[in-house]
Amino acid sequence: MKYVTNHPTYGEIQLDWGFWTGKFKLAIGGKELKKVSKTGFELQLPDSEAPVSVQVFGNNFKGFGIMIGTQPIQLSPPAKWYDIVLSVIPAVIWFIMIGGAIGGAFAGGWGVATLYLLLSRPIIKHKILIGIGSIVSSAVLSLILSFVIVAIYQSLGLI
């Protein structure tokens, strides 16, 4: 995901975060910063000889930000309560309908994918549509999968 904000002192700040890999890339003022650790970067300011430490903090739930020296700059808003609820409901449906390891795997994947989609859309109407679509599709697909599992068990004579 890409988070971009304009700061009065530093100009455009762009944070690229790999959702699946967890890797960060950070650019301030159009210039990509040198990475020194997993979440640490170095920023060379024009008025100082030594580079300034820049740390990335946060996650999807708390929102992402950077700390330039001792100055925190928030880049993305934290997840709202309705983002969490709209991503947990489809996961619960999967777990209840299928259960076990298969249901847990689908529940986890579906919940994470829904949360990713919800956090990538800032407009509340879009979030509601994504949430409703995720709930309905998870209910229908989990019902179909449960029928398939029952049919397989019946064909094997286990039921």
Image (cartoon, grey):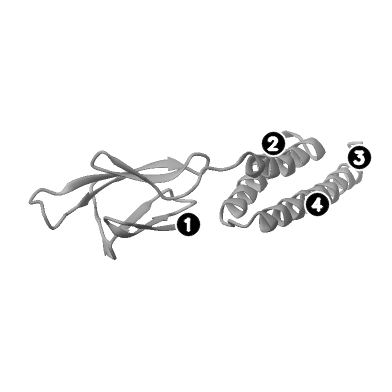
The residue furthest front is 8
What separation in Å lies between label 3 and label 1 (alpha carbons)? 48 Å
Upstream in the sequence, badge 1 or badge 2? 1
10 up-or-down from 59: above or below: below
Upstream in the sequence, badge 1 or badge 4? 1
Which mark's residue is nearer the viewer, 3 or 1?
1
What separation in Å lies between label 3 and label 4 (alpha carbons)? 32 Å
- Give, as a three-letter code, the residue at label 2: Ala
Upstream in the sequence, badge 3 or badge 2? 2
Residue beneath label 1, please? Answer: 1
- Point out which mark residue 136 bears: 4
- Where disc 4 sits, the SS reads helix
What separation in Å lies between label 1 and label 4 (alpha carbons)? 26 Å
What separation in Å lies between label 3 and label 2 (alpha carbons)? 22 Å
The residue furthest bottom is 30
What separation in Å lies between label 1 and label 2 (alpha carbons)? 29 Å
Residue 27 locus on image (x, y percent): 31, 59
Residue 19 locus on image (x, y percent): 49, 52
